[in-house]
């Protein structure tokens, strides 16, 4: 969800100040253009960083509109050495005159693993894709909205701010206040650096400095992938690192970093609510006052924090704990007092290997932090489509019957300086109740309901199919939500889209709550090798467009028979007729696509009745490498040379494949193939 910010300024005459819009397009832009020219979407700048310093901040603020494309780092931010796509040195001038960097193709979880959206790519070393450090300058009143941050194994942070250097302890940072981070998608960062504080691997680092603090830091509605070095011994690596006061961290979905939310140097007036925090290495949430720095700000004591309605599951599961031997849901240490407590309420916690609550490094959990109404539930029961490592098809909507539905609270810590500790909407923009029970997690499952899309199965893997042959598979579209699902016609696109086709009939819009429809997809490979495409559905549910990956491979069927010969020896005819013992030939599908026997085996020729075949071969497709048995018997009805032809009709080249006897004066019944294309299976018998 990208929160829709309303920028307005009321002048003395009561008018509303207009925003100034600038445009950036990597494909058509030109950085030599003037600021006035770049206010026209037809004549944009080329790079995002070019906007900083060139634009003029109007009384209503600025929006920098960024068109989808890949934007690479090329700037070294002054005073930091950071290699960045954007060095934000120019900020807004007030809460109503902000600078907003906005991707006009908003990020979503469905973009995970793709190059879609406004993709920010750092290069070189010491990366901060969007840097607000700017020592000794920097910027206040900045919004970062809707960007897709590419994987970066040597990143220090994907979005990073830091207070100016050299300040006396105990005063507020003059810069990096009021940064709002909304609706971004971050892919893995920092995983190549085992334990380097300069390449820590934070996705979003909104930091003051030890002994100083920033204010009004907001991290809301983001999808935050793995960060840091989860398999190593380093304590660094955070989904969200926040060092300040009056912080709001809500409606985020984060997975597989070392720590989910790290509130450092004492949490002060901070709200952490309605987040989904999955499979962290060490801790889901860490709230800690680092003693050597004292309280977190001058004149504002630590405490008055609310951590509620979060889902924190599977912390420590599958990870080594070589740094602090932790793995708990929440750690709170010296971050509150008896007169300024912390409320940790109505969180859903499950599978955290060191328990739900832990003090720092073996100390007791803060006695000033109350933990009422903690709930426990397996996340596969909570969420529509859950995995420890999120994918583009993960779905963190709440399942019917989950304890998370109505299991949350609107109650903030007593004495809270903020009016609410619950976000006004969920991550998809659905309005939450203003008071009373709340749904836990990032999504609402309200009585009015929202549509929820699931495709099952997904992806569709057709496996190997003979070139020009066709196979169909189905996937079921289900609306598991509480409102009608509306959608346009599904489409297929991708590298080999023409090899896949949607077969009529198809589901019709709308799908009412709880109903489903079936899409049938036909795969007809036009060439050998891997063939891929994607079925896409544009709809009114969160996460749209929804996609089903389509995979298959084109191949050629083949047939091989082993052993290459069978000899029945001398066998006298009898009355009644008797047969030799069975000799078995193994038929193998030896090509690169399934082989199908298209008709029962048959005998033709001079004496077809003297030979029998049976076994395990049937008319079902045989995948490459699989085999079946042909059991052969010779049942002579008269003396002398006896001959017949065994006919195998199949989908391999050269079908039908015939095996027949080649006789000499002393031999009878040797079968060999007409064609040398396939292995021969001669069968010989001698009659007296």
Image: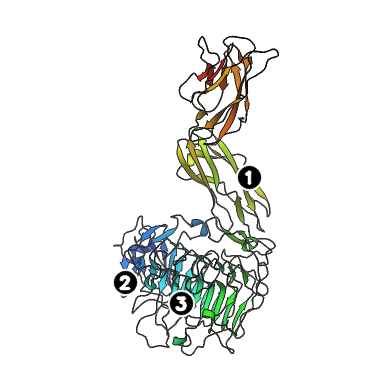
Colour style of the rendered protein structure: rainbow
Of callouts 1 and 2, the N-terminal one: 2
Disc 1 to disc 2: CB gap under 8 Å: no
- To which quarter of the image does residue 649 belong? top right
Seen at 51% across and 19% down, the residue is: 672
Task: Determine crowd level at label 2: few under 14, some 14-19, many 20+ residues with C-alpha closer than 10 A.
Answer: some
| Extreme-left residue of the structure | 32
Spot occupied by residue 530 in the image (x, y as percentages of width and height):
46, 42
Residue 563 visible? The answer is: yes
Q: CA distance from mark 3 to mark 1?
A: 48 Å
Q: CA distance from mark 1 to mark 2?
A: 54 Å
Q: Which residue is mark 2?
A: 81
**Label 2's element?**
loop
* Depth check, front residue: 94 or 260: 260
Q: CA distance from mark 2 to mark 3?
A: 23 Å
Left/right placement of residue 33 relative to residue 617 reads left
* Depth check, front residue: 449 or 77: 77
Q: Is residue 653 above or below residue 513?
A: above
Left/right placement of residue 219 relative to residue 127 reads right
Of callouts 2 and 3, the N-terminal one: 2
* Depth check, front residue: 377 or 398: 377
Spot occupied by residue 13 in the image (x, y as percentages of width and height):
48, 79
Disc 2 to disc 3: CB gap under 8 Å: no
- Identify the disc placed on residue 518: 1
- Identify the disc placed on residue 178: 3
**Label 3's element?**
loop
**Label 1's element?**
strand
- To which quarter of the image does residue 123 belong? bottom left
- Assign the C terminus to one quadrant of the image: top right
């Amino acid at each position: 969800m990208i929160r829709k910010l309303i920028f307005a300024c009321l002048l003395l005459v009561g008018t509303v100040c207009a925003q100034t819009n600038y445009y950036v397009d990597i494909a058509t832009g030109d950085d030599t253009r003037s600021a006035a020219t770049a206010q026209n979407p037809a004549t944009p700048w080329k790079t995002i960083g070019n906007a900083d310093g060139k634009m003029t901040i109007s009384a209503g603020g600025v929006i920098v509109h960024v068109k989808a494309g890949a934007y690479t780092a090329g700037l070294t931010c002054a005073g930091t050495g950071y290699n960045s796509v954007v060095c934000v040195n120019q900020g807004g001038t007030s809460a109503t005159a902000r600078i907003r960097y906005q991707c006009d193709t908003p990020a979503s979880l469905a973009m995970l693993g793709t190059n879609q959206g406004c993709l920010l790519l750092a290069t070189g070393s010491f990366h901060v894709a969007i840097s607000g450090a700017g020592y000794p300058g920097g910027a206040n009143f900045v919004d970062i909205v809707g960007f897709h941050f590419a994987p970066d194994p040597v990143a220090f942070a994907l979005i990073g701010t830091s207070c100016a250097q050299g300040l006396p302890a105990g005063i507020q940072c003059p810069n990096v206040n009021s940064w709002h981070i909304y609706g971004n998608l971050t892919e893995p960062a920092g995983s190549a650096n085992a334990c380097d504080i300069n390449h820590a691997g934070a996705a979003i680092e909104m930091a003051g400095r030890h002994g100083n603090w920033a204010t009004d830091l907001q991290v809301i509605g983001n999808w935050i992938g793995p960060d840091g070095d989860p398999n190593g011994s380093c304590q660094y690596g955070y989904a969200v690192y926040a060092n300040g006061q009056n912080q709001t961290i809500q409606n985020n979905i984060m997975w597989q970093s070392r720590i989910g939310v790290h509130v450092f140097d004492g949490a002060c007036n901070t709200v952490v609510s309605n987040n989904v925090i999955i499979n962290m290495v060490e801790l889901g949430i860490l709230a800690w006052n680092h003693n050597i720095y004292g309280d977190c700000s001058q004149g504002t004591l630590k405490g008055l924090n609310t951590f509620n309605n979060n889902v924190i599951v599977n912390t420590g599961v599958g990870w080594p704990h070589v740094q602090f031997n932790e793995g708990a849901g929440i750690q709170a240490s010296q971050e509150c007092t008896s007169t300024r407590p912390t409320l940790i309420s109505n969180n859903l916690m499950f599978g955290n290997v060191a328990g739900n609550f832990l003090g720092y490094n073996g100390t007791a959990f803060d006695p000033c932090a109350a933990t009422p109404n903690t709930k426990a539930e397996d996340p596969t029961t909570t969420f529509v489509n859950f995995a420890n490592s999120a994918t583009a098809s993960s779905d963190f909507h709440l399942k019917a019957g989950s304890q998370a539905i109505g299991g949350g609270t609107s109650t903030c810590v007593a004495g809270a300086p903020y009016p609410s500790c619950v976000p006004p909407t969920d991550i998809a923009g659905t309005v939450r109740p203003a008071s009373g029970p709340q749904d836990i997690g990032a999504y609402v499952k309200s009585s009015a309901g929202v549509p929820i899309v699931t495709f099952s199965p997904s992806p569709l893997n057709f496996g190997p199919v003979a070139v020009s042959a066709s196979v169909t598979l189905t996937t079921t579209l289900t609306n598991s939500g509480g409102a009608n699902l509306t959608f346009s016609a599904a489409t297929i696109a991708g590298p080999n889209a023409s090899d896949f086709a949607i077969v009529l009939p198809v589901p019709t819009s709308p799908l009412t709550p709880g109903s489903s429809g079936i899409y049938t997809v036909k795969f007809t490979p036009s060439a050998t090798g891997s063939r891929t495409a994607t079925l896409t559905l544009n709809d009114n549910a969160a996460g749209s467009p929804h996609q089903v990956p389509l995979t298959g491979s084109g191949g050629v069927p083949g047939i091989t028979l082993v052993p290459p010969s069978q000899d029945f020896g001398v066998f006298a005819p009898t009355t009644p007729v008797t047969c030799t013992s069975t000799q078995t030939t193994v038929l193998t599908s030896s090509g690169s696509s399934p082989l199908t026997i298209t008709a029962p085996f048959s005998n033709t020729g001079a004496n077809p009745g003297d030979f029998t075949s049976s076994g395990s071969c049937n008319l079902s497709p045989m995948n490459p490498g699989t085999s079946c048995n042909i059991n052969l018997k010779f049942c002579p009805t008269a003396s002398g040379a006896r001959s017949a032809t065994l006919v195998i009709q199949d989908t391999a080249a050269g079908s039908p494949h015939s095996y027949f006897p080649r006789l000499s004066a002393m031999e009878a019944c040797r079968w060999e193939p007409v064609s040398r294309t396939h292995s021969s299976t001669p069968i010989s018998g001698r009659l007296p």
